Amino acid sequence: MVYIVVRINRVTLRLILSATGISVCCFLLVLIVRNFSNNTHEKESKSVKCDYPSTQTLFSQTTSSVSNITRNKPILKPCKPIKKTSPVQRAIVIYYPHHQSEEFFPEVRWLYRSWVEMLLGEPSTWRTDLVIFTYNFSSEFRRLGCVHRLRQNKEEPSMCRLFLYVPIQFRTKNITDNDFQHAFDDAKRVIESYKDINDSFIGVPLVNDKETFDAKRSESLYENLRTYGYIDSINSIYEGYWTFKTYDFILRTDIDVFIYRHFATYIPSNCTFITGGGGYSTDFNRRKLKRIANDMGFVHVDITNMGSTWYGSPYDAYLVANQTLYGMLWLAHYEFAMPERESKLGTLMWPEWHFGVLLLYGQHLALNHLVGINQIRLRMGQDLLDLSSTDDRVEYVQQRIRLNLHCWHTDLPFSKFAFKMGKYNQTDLEKYKNDTTAQAYAMRMALESNNFGNDTHQIEPEPVKCDCSLTQNSFSQTIPSVSNITPNKPILKPCKPIKKTSPVQRAIVIYYPSHQSEYFFPEVKWLYRSWVEMLLGEPSTWRTDLVIFTYNFSSEFRRLGCVNRLRQNKQEPSMCRLFLYVPIQFRTKNITDNDFQHAFDDAKRVIESYKDMNDSFIGVPLVNDKETFDAKHVFIYHHFATYIPSNCAFITGGGRYTTEFNRRKLKSIAHDMGFAHVNLLNMGSTWYGSPYDGYLVANQTLHGMLWLALYEFAMPERESKLGTLMWPEWHYGVLLLYGQQLALNHLVGINQIRILIGHNLLDQLTTDDRVEYVQKGIRLNLHCWHTDLPFSKFVFKMGKYNQTDLEKYKNGKTAQAYAMRMALESKYMTLEELAAYGRKKSLSS
């Protein structure tokens, strides 16, 4: 028999109190955990997240945070399909810039004329209003019969309705003060002068309507996009939503369109939101926009080339307008630099990346996101909307599916430009009356609008049939894979610190473009001269070679004593070593065929002519070496002689390329590449560290440069058509520094290198006339920047220092004096004298 003995302790008051206390603590702990979980869930449920803390303060002239730019919380509404047999209320909605009436009122007239033509074929229970947002109720609209009131009911006839809207560019402080109190004073006086208009005043924005007005976003639009010509055509849809939300459908359109007959009986089926076709997409911007969507926290489903004409429910249009504005602001803040936003580039960047189509880019982001989160059902209606007004074919007319015609930028008839220039004034209207093409329809509507009357409604409508099934549009476009660009596999090597008392071997490495010798050889000479000067102070067991990569072993380098051989041992003296390298621009098929077999033929013949050179030939690239086949205007300063990096640090100089704009942009691009980013910036192009670290950084820098060239710089930028217009925000000329920033952030982030940004060590200015840096003994090299102050490389090459007295600089202790002396001595000395001094490690007075 087995016994289980359970010992029960005596229950005391202390035990009861202890148990009660523990229970209370557990209960409170559960409550805390549950509350914390709930809060976390609430935070995660927001549609948009921004992982960039600096987003809130990047632009002092903008809104204080992204959340102030948009409320990204679309609300699902159930779909209630509308039958064609039911009463249907529609609105054709435009924005009209009243301050540009001479340019745009002719377009309003022909749009109005085509709207009237379309109404002839509309079912008797349907109503289609022409809704115009503008800032002034001018007499022209009064004469067209436009009214200033909301639709009252389904029976009210189709009308032109004009609502007052304050354009973004006019939202100055005087206008927006006190909730836009005096924004419409002038417009109200005009309306009051029309004695028969007694309706309630309709003004947009409605500042107390939180659904349609965001004061901070309005301010941000003014600060950033008030000069963008199309901003009001989208913002009026968002802020004006309350004026047209009772319609079943709206057609949002530009002014330069004609409403076609078939629109009379066509409505979207299955609650679809239809867009026309756009012509803005290229492989370059398609991929770029996908990267940006990810950066925004937006979904992207690879739909592209959507046009700016929309046809769908008012609520869908409101959603799209809201997110489009958000996308436009994001792009303006973070993807378009100030020169682009100020239109200084003109059309140089079209079609790759053009600020002029910001609306379409913002809409692209919005529609991809809303489709991706199942907020709208999109149909790409290239077969329905935006037929060209130049089309002289009849098949579209026979198919009866085109809903509107759009004027593109052309001189072919019908051309809006030719029309406004009066080139059609002598055109015979009769020839177009029986012509059924889109071209003829546009021509007739425009010409008749010049002499518009009430007797023009003569065209009988024809029934329309259309398959409005939802279409899926995916655009497969080939992008080279990253794996084809670079092997991104850095290999850890252990750190073995080198003591200053040990023998040290160093190399100063430059690339010399032999085909530009007239410009760059003077720089090589002063660099060589300063290298020799530095050698005078080097410890006896140290060696520092000057290594030059170039495509030709010219006689000048021969006279300088340069050799074409690798370092043999630690005892070999410091030398100038020249290795043959094939520049990228010369790697044509003829050169690269058969593993670069004949790439160095000319250089070899030159070397063979030097009878005393019997070393093995050194040529780069070494194509069978899988590890490796994938600045001159400086002076080496005294202090370099005894300085080496400690603790295996990789030292860079300081750069001057960073702005808030490109800082954030490069961080976003790093994320897109799958690179780490640790917020290092402004690194210069001078490096000092181990050869392996230099190799790693060069490898990843090349990867970064290729990525940027493929995906972030459009062809006009790569072809240098922009000059310096984009400096300093985003400039192709500093591609190397951008690529290097990506590389260094990544390598530091994955613990492959230990970096020291050596502002106090490398790249001191050659114009510096202070002595403190010299006294501290920490500056390792001097760098020539773009300046005319002494020492200036430009002034030197122009011969303006030829009469300079060298004696005055011999005892100078400043960086400026050192640069001047090195450059002048390199000019006065023959190449043979320079070589001799290099061999002797000494200089005569």
Image (spheres, rainbow, N blue to C red):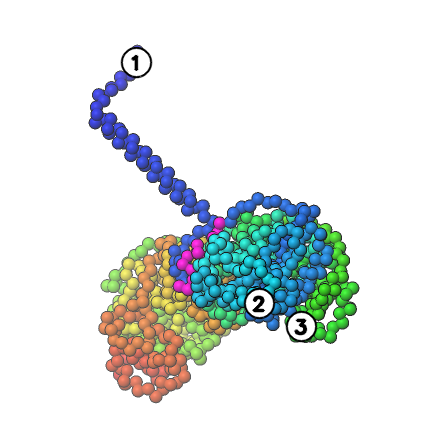
What whole-number distance in Å separates the C-alpha atoms at marks 1 and 2? 109 Å
Residue 65, picture quadrant: bottom left
Q: Amino acid at mark 1?
A: Val
Label 3 sits on residue = 418
**Relative to 602, is 25 on the left or the right?**
left
Residue at (66% x, 51% y) in the render: 155
- The answer to whether one can see residue 226 in this image is no
Q: What's the magenta region?
A: 60-73
Question: Magenta includes 62?
Answer: yes
- The answer to whether one can see residue 659 in this image is yes
Q: Amino acid at mark 2?
A: Ser
| Front residue of this view, candidates 16 and 196 | 196
Q: Residues within 10 Å of mark 1 (few under 14, many from 20)?
A: few
Up/down of 181 relative to 720, above or below? above
Residue at disc 2, secondary structure = helix
Residue 677, picture quadrant: bottom left
Q: Position of residue 708 (x, y in %)?
A: 48, 62
Predominant SS of the magenta segment: loop
Residue at disc 3, secondary structure = helix
Question: Magenta includes 652?
Answer: no
**Labelled disc at residue 2:** 1
Q: Amino acid at mark 3?
A: Ala
Nearer the observer: mark 1 or 2; the answer is 2
Of the two numbered discs 1 and 3 on the same chain, state the one appearing first in sequence: 1
Label 2 sits on residue = 193
Name the quadrant of the C terminus.
bottom left
